[in-house]
Image (cartoon, rainbow, N blue to C red):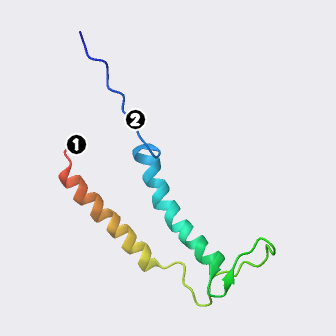
Amino acid sequence: MRAPAEIIHFEFGGPYLGPLAITVGLPAVCYILTYICNARGCFTLRDPLSIPGFPPGTVVFSWQAVGVVIGWSLFMASSVSARVQI
């Protein structure tokens, strides 16, 4: 008699949706929190137009940061794939 097939249960969106949500969602939350609450003040529900925005001179994008993130991702992917046999 054969054993029943084992059912694999994934949590937090499985192996694709969860990591993608963390990779995209965490930086988005950090930018949003910096945008709506900083040294100049915080967003209030009493005055919806009171969003203070980014502090003057804040750089929110740089090609150097993009290069570092892509380089780190490639490094991690190559180090993991070297240990995992497919």
In the picture, the quarter occupied by the C terminus is top left
- The mark found on residue 26 in the picture is none
23, above or below 57, in the image: above
- How many marks on residues? 2
User: Residue 31 location in percent, x, y?
Assistant: 57, 73
- The mark found on residue 86 in the picture is 1
Q: Tell me where residue 77 sits by quadrant.
A: bottom left
Left of 68 or right of it: where is 83? left
50, above or below 71, in the image: below
**Category of crowding for the residue at label 2, using alpha-carbon neighbours closer than 10 angstroms: few (below 14), some (14–19), many (at least 20):** few
Counting residues from the N terminus, which is met first, the one under dot 2 or under dot 1? 2
Q: Spot the residue most to the top.
A: 1
Hey, what amino acid is under mark 2?
His
Mark 2 to mark 1 CA distance (whole Å)? 21 Å
Left of 47 or right of it: where is 8? left
At horizontal 60% and vertical 71% (from top left) the residue drawn is 32
Q: Tell me where residue 54 sits by quadrant.
A: bottom right
Left of 30 or right of it: where is 53? right
Hey, what amino acid is under mark 1?
Ile
At horizontal 76% and vertical 79% (from top left) the residue drawn is 50
Mark 2: which secondary structure? loop
User: Residue 80 location in percent, x, y?
Assistant: 24, 55
User: Residue 59 location in percent, x, y?
Assistant: 54, 84
47, above or below 85, in the image: below
Mark 1: which secondary structure? loop
Q: Spot the residue most to the bottom.
A: 57
Q: Which residue is mark 2?
A: 9
Please name which of the two marks, 2 or 1, marks the residue nearer to the observer.
2
At horizontal 59% and vertical 77% (from top left) the residue drawn is 34
At horizontal 24% and vertical 53% (from top left) the residue drawn is 81
In the picture, the quarter occupied by the N terminus is top left
Left of 39 or right of it: where is 46? right
